Amino acid sequence: MSDTPTYGFDTLQIHAGSAPDPATGARQTPIYQNTGYVFRDADHAAALFNLQEVGFIYSRLTNPTVAVLQERLATLEGGVGAVATSSGHAAQIMALFPLMRPGDNVVVSNKLYGGTVTQFSQTIKRFGWEAKFVDIDDRGAVSRACTKKTKAIFCESIANPGGHVADLESIAKIADRKGIPLIVDNTTATPYLCNPIAHGATLVVHSTTKYISGNGTAMGGVVIDSGKFDWSASDKFPSLSEPEPAYHGLKFHETFGHLAFTFHGIAIGLRDLGMCQSPQNAFLTLLGCETLSLRMERHVANAKKIAEWLENDDRIEHVTYAGLKSSPHARRVKKLYKKGAGALFTFAVKGGYDACVKLVDSVELFSHVANLGDTRSLIIHSASTTHRQLTPEQQEAAGAAANVVRVSIGLEDADDLIRDLDQALSKAVG
Amino acid sequence: MDESYTDDHLRKILRRTKTVACVGVSLNEVRPSYFVARYLKLKQFRVIGVNPGYAGQTGFGDQIVASLGEIPAAVGPVHMVDIFRRSEQAGAVVDEALDALLDRGLQTIWMQIGVTDPDAAARAREKGVDVIMNRCPKIEYQRLFGELRWGGIATGIISSKLK
């Protein structure tokens, strides 16, 4: 948005959005743990409620601590604005909400995090929305799945847990041709490893609960808008292009231009869906964000070392880490992930379901946890936990078959992690 | 091709401007031009509305006039003309501004988001007038002076100074 030369990632992850607190000079972003804000007078209140001025009304809509996180993440992703939410799941609903009406659908990759598969295949039906699952690598299938009622294409940059790497540029081209936005969940890659907007995405969502906060402390999500989509080019997106009855007939896109999606997210999304992020969680996430690049470098280095060790172990059938030379995604990784392919992957254990359960029970350093992107290394048997609600076919497509365990490699000493897997594999497989 | 402007340049323009003529202004409270004019007035700019449809009515603290040429001498210098018209009509407004206001302190011609006319911009710049195209002064003011930050917008402003 600014025309002034910008700064490097390491600088922006610390400084973007966070000037010294204007009220006190506090250098670290303070936690504004309050709900309401005093209006100057009745005119000021009216102008804020009419969206004629930007300001603080109520912390469900805007909060100074949360706003710093929003600006920081929008900046790191190369977007124009961001709306922070209570979780990554909330961010997905907040991304779809301005685009969808009852009867509309979203074309989504069949290689997605299991929780997202359930949210999209079951829960959103209750809003009258439909998700059409496709093989995201099959351009013809993606294109054919898009109908007049399709309002977006959705995929993950590096899919959890199977490590499928989406060819963002070619998917973005299909979305462009169809006149709809591409939404990319960039949770597992983080803005340090990949900026989907630079590859053609319109919207980026994150579960900030993962690498961005980084310590397994704070739930949160975010929707970042590229500001590049013309919401008024067709009649597909009336929430953004047509008069909004709740604001006296204001048209968001006409009034706010490239900031329309962000303001709609605050003024309609947070106002009425109420999935706001708490200031305390925004503060913790900001603390984590300050060291994102440093942590991701170590996450990637550890993951690579451990994946290579596993790949050469006789007890392992295969390893899906996209950063391996043997990965079927190696070419895409080379193009899209110059700084590494993240630190989340799966491996298949000889001995199937039972061996996987035994392995998870036998580790000492790895924690058996349904999370990822922690400083600590985590392990989970997806088929019996996070992907339990899925059919075997869905599990297979998502890369969470019964003989597969998922690891989120942390920041510990890589050799210690290898030793831990070695002893646990001995117990599980023999 | 979108022109680019440095933050310093935009800041200088917004700081030196005291009076703005808003061509194509509306008194309909949900129109973007109303948002902008009302906001500029709130931020202590003097706002002269220009729209034949509202001529004679009072808006934003002053009487609205039908054309730039009809801004009363008593208003004093008019530093900036802000154009809320389609690009095809912007050139005529620029020429009218150069004709009527060049000797009345005109420093800047600003065209709103979606409005561009590079030929008209060149004519104005030849006369020493700064031109900004395809931007909104309200958004830039909010971005450069802190307010937009409260809405989670990427302002591009990085500073460790206490403001």
Image: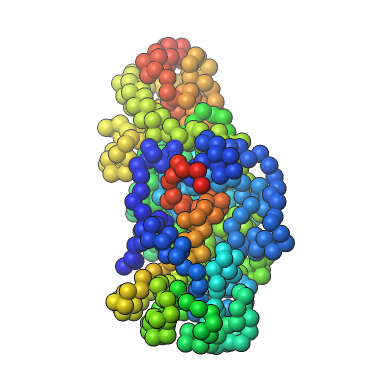
Closer to the camera in the image, B106 or A393: B106
Residue A132, given in percent of the width and then of the height, sits at 50, 54
Location of residue B10 (image quadrant): bottom left
Q: In the picture, which quadrant includes the C terminus of chain A?
A: top left
Residue A357, given in percent of the width and then of the height, sits at 52, 21
Q: In the picture, which quadrant includes the N terminus of chain A?
A: bottom left
Q: How many marks?
A: 0
Closer to the camera in the image, A262 or B21: B21
Residue A34, given in percent of the width and then of the height, sits at 68, 42
Task: Name the residue at 37% across, 27% down.
Answer: A298
In the image, taking residue A338 as reference, residue A117 lies left or right, namely right
Q: Is residue A387 visible?
A: no
Task: Name the residue at 38% across, 46% down.
Answer: A195
Q: Residue furthest right?
A: A42
Residue A263, given in percent of the width and then of the height, sits at 56, 58
Task: Name the residue at 72% across, 62% down.
Answer: A42
Q: How is the image coloured?
A: rainbow
Task: Name the residue at 60% across, 65% down.
Answer: B42
Closer to the camera in the image, A255 or A198: A255
When the figure is inspected, residue B2 is found, relative to residue A25, above or below; the finding is below
Closer to the camera in the image, A427 or A175: A175
When the figure is inspected, residue A41 is found, relative to residue A86, above or below; the finding is below
Q: Is residue A90 visible?
A: yes
In the image, taking residue A46 as reference, residue B143 lies left or right, namely left
